[in-house]
Image: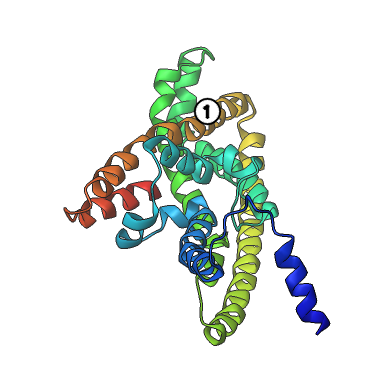
Amino acid sequence: MQLKNNKVNINSERDPNRSTIPLRKVSDKSIKLNPKIKKIKGINSFNDFELNSLNYKDALEIDKRTYLEYYISLLKTKHPIIFTFCPIKDYNTLTIKICLFFLSFSIYYFFNTIFFTYNTIHKVYEDKGSYSISYFMPSIICSFIFSYIINKFIKYLSLSERNLAELKNEKMNKILFDKQAKVQRCLIVKYICYFIISFIFLVFFWYYLSSFCAVYQNSQVYVIKNTFISFIIGLIYPFFINLIPGIFRLYSLKNRKAKKEFVYKISKFLQFL
């Protein structure tokens, strides 16, 4: 009886200016909005790697980014300095990213030394020690290409984002539990292999570079200059190459009625370069 009286009191104290909407209608309205809210939260929970890795059908529904937003997302995931030192939303270990950055410089140094041949040393001698960037540019470009390929391969093998993104998108609890153990083992193997390969590379680089510098002491300055130039090319390269994928991607997603999945696949291939 007391509960009934309380209920009556509450209703009697209701503000007369308040709208008297039936409770059932309010509930129905909130239920209709929930899927939309959930969908918006799902979109916002994707990071740049996940959005860029969407298949064509999902990209048509989810990816509403502009050309500039897509371009910036590629820079955040592919530019060495931005990817390593700027705080971005990804699933990679910061320690691995920093190690990859310094290892990449060692690889640039190694390949520039490889392309510094006896003919190059003879040319420097003929030019009386003057540094001619036009003469060194072909070897610098070759060093950049080989270094970029090796760094790309090591980065693909060592980073954990691809594995964790697949784990995040799994919905079934039983499958999620099984895949979680599998991903954990995979990441452990990845990290062990990465540090073993890095250690072998660094030891070999140290031996080769120290031997080269001991024999050709007057050539060290030229090798270091070539290394920095090729490394700077590696820092500038992402700003230009990442302009291309967005053209194909936005064209493939612009008209929903016309199926342009092949063009979309081209953009995904180009964004990997």
Above or below, comparing residue 129 to residue 165 in the picture: above
Here the colouring is rainbow
Above or below, comparing residue 259 to residue 211 in the picture: below
> Which residue is more in the foreground, 138 or 158?
158
> Which residue is more in the foreground, 55 or 85?
55
Residue 209 position by quadrant: top right
> Which residue is more in the foreground, 170 or 41?
41
Task: Give the residue type that dot 1 points to.
Answer: Asn
Q: Position of residue 118 (x, y in %)?
A: 47, 32
Q: In the visual, does 103 lie left or right of 226?
A: right
Residue at the left extreme of this rendering: 258
Q: Position of residue 111 (x, y in %)?
A: 50, 41
Q: Residue at x 66, y 50 (%)?
A: 99
Quarter in which the N terminus is drawn? bottom right
Q: Position of residue 174 (x, y in %)?
A: 55, 87
Q: Residue at x 52, y 12 (%)?
A: 128
Residue 86 position by quadrant: top right
Q: Is residue 273 visible?
A: no
Residue at the bottom extreme of this rendering: 174
Residue carrying label 1:
226
Q: In the visual, does 6 lie left or right of 251?
A: right
- Crowding at label 1, few (<14), some or many (≥20) Cα neighbours within 10 Å? many
Q: Residue at x 38, y 29 (%)?
A: 138
Residue at the right extreme of this rendering: 2
Q: Is residue 189 visible?
A: yes
Q: Residue at x 58, y 38 (%)?
A: 82
Q: Position of residue 45 (x, y in %)?
A: 55, 57
